[in-house]
């Protein structure tokens, strides 16, 4: 059984996930995820741990390096909400800092049953331009999803 997921444990685990030397590694946090995890962000919605692990692996493959700074954490009985800055370094593109937050919902067994990431990669602007909307979403899916 995993150690209880607290604000402090979250900082420790996510601090190991995203490092300053090399690709991210999520293997140590996957045991905290429920088999029926529901993940949702600005680009996609995924159900099931296998698909979530595959999503993480695709992101790892596409990035040379990923770094995340946890800016704040708030925790109540079965929810953890944290604010972050993530910088992605790609092979062919400049570093991309993103600011966002994540809401984790824990089940009775202290497993993450829902994860909702909130961030915006210029989506509100590009969605308002009809001829650019589709290429932008294709790009986002190809490189981030």
Image (cartoon, rainbow, N blue to C red):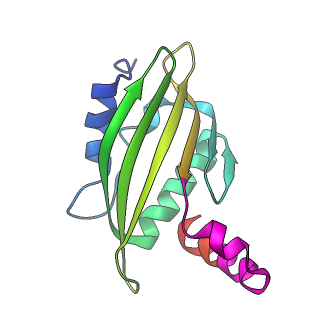
Using the rendered view, name the quadrant where residue 139 is placed. Answer: bottom right
Q: State which quarter of the image contains the N terminus.
A: top left
Using the rendered view, name the quadrant where residue 71 is placed. Answer: top left
31 is higher (above) or lower (below) than 16: above
Q: Is residue 8 left or right of residue 37?
A: left
Residue 68 in the image, given as x and y percentages of width and height:
32, 53
Residue 19 in the image, given as x and y percentages of width and height:
24, 55
Residue under the image location 55 percent in, 61 percent down: 120
Closer to the camera in the image, 33 or 41: 41
Which residue is most to the right? Answer: 130
Residue 125 in the image, given as x and y percentages of width and height:
64, 72
137 is higher (above) or lower (below) than 50: below
Q: Main secondary structure of the magenta part?
A: helix
Residue under the image location 38 percent in, 21 percent down: 2
Q: State which quarter of the image contains the C terminus.
A: bottom right
Q: Is residue 104 left or right of residue 70?
A: right
Residue 26 is at least partly visible in this image: no
| Magenta-highlighted residues | 119-138
Residue under the image location 56 percent in, 54 percent down: 54
Residue 29 is at least partly visible in this image: yes
3 is higher (above) or lower (below) than 80: above
Which residue is most to the left? Answer: 21
86 is higher (above) or lower (below) than 142: above
Closer to the camera in the image, 77 or 3: 77
């Amino acid at each position: 059984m995993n150690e209880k997921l607290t604000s402090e444990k979250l900082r420790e685990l996510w601090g190991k996930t995203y490092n300053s030397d090399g690709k991210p590694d999520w293997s140590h946090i996957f045991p905290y995820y429920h088999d029926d995890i529901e993940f949702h962000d600005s680009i996609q919605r995924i159900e099931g741990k296998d698909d979530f692990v595959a999503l993480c692996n695709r992101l790892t493959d596409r990035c040379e390096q990923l770094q995340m700074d946890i800016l704040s954490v708030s925790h109540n009985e079965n929810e953890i909400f944290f604010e972050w800055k993530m910088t992605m370094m790609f092979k062919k593109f400049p570093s991309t800092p993103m600011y966002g937050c994540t809401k984790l919902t824990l089940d009775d067994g202290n497993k993450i049953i829902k994860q909702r990431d909130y961030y915006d990669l210029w989506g509100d602007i590009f969605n308002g331009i009809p001829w650019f909307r589709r290429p932008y979403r294709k790009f986002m899916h190809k490189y981030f999803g």
